[in-house]
Image (cartoon, rainbow, N blue to C red):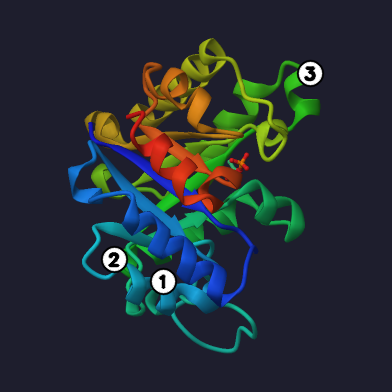
């Protein structure tokens, strides 16, 4: 399966930073020559600017969240159809920062993922355990609950991405061991078979949590790891490109 390397820029930078980062990605080479797909998810206000800057580059564009309904009285929210309208093809959903900052539940994440699919976007549904849950040996139970509760039912498997992001590894410089990653990704694949049947093999399962150029290859070569969701290192065009070259 062709890997996906996705950059989550989170709430970082202003317009000039977004433009420079997108320009930077273009200077490293032709994304079409990579053996993986490249995706960047800038803050909402800069999606149009980044879409323009990346035009013709084969780097895909994604949002960091969307609402579960297509329009209406939802002040401050963004519809999946709006993301599609400005050129997005993906949207990150249920990131642990959304789950903790905004109390997003599995049911809400699933409703958003269904809205994303209806709008023609590929949802990247994030799951992952906290350090407390990990220390309490709850990792697989948490992953099972989140996957079963957040993944939309009855969708085309090729249009779904799941990201395993242990919360304790996000932005901390700590990563799960390759063996732990392989174990959790294997479990996610098994859960997906139960949810989408045979097509589960086509769902890309990304690892996220302090992925850097120097650990990317080891993580990306584990069984059932079909790419990476990258936070901090995606803010540096050279580092992000180096991760993409590890595929
Ligand atoms: C993320 O925010 O999804 C993430 C994985 O961040 P970082 O790479 O900085 O750990």
Q: Are marks 1 and 3 in contact (CB under 8 Å)?
A: no
Q: Is residue 65 above or below residue 204?
A: below
Upstream in sequence: badge 1 or badge 2 = 1
Q: Callout 3: few (<14), some (14-19), or many (20+) C-alpha neighbours within 10 Å?
A: few
**Badge 3 element:** loop
The disc label shown at residue 120, or none: 2
Q: Nearer the viewer, residue 203 or 190?
A: 203
Q: How many marks?
A: 3
The disc label shown at residue 50, or none: 1
Upstream in sequence: badge 1 or badge 3 = 1
Q: Residue at x 61, y 21 (%)?
A: 176
Q: Nearer the viewer, mark 1 or mark 2?
A: 1
**Badge 2 element:** loop
Q: Is residue 107 left or right of residue 60?
A: right
Residue 104 percent location from the top left of the image? 67, 56
Quarter of the N terminus within the rendering: top left
- Which residue is tagged 3? 136
């Amino acid at each position: 399966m062709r890997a996906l390397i996705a950059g989550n820029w989170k709430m970082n930078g202003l317009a000039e930073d977004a433009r420079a980062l997108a320009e930077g990605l273009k200077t490293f080479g032709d994304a079409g020559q990579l053996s993986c797909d490249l995706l960047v998810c800038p803050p909402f206000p800069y999606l149009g600017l980044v879409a323009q800057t990346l035009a013709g580059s084969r780097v895909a564009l994604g949002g960091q969240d969307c609402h579960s309904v297509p329009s209406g009285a939802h002040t401050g929210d963004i519809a999946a159809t709006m993301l599609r309208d400005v050129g997005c093809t993906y949207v990150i959903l249920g990131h642990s920062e959304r789950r903790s900052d905004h109390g997003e539940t599995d049911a809400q994440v699933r409703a958003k993922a269904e809205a994303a699919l209806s709008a023609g976007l590929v949802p990247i549904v994030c799951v992952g355990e906290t350090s407390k849950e990990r220390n309490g040996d709850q990792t697989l139970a948490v992953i099972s609950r989140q996957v079963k509760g957040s993944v939309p039912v009855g969708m085309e498997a090729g249009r779904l991405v799941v990201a395993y992001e242990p919360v304790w590894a996000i932005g901390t410089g700590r990563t799960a061991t390759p063996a732990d990653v392989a174990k959790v990704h294997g479990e996610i694949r098994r859960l997906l078979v139960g949810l989408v049947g045979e097509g589960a093999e086509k769902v890309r399962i990304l690892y996220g949590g302090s992925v850097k150029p120097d650990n990317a290859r080891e993580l990306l070569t584990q069984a059932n790891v079909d790419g990476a969701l990258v936070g901090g290192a995606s803010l540096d065009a050279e580092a992000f490109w180096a991760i993409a070259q590890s595929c």
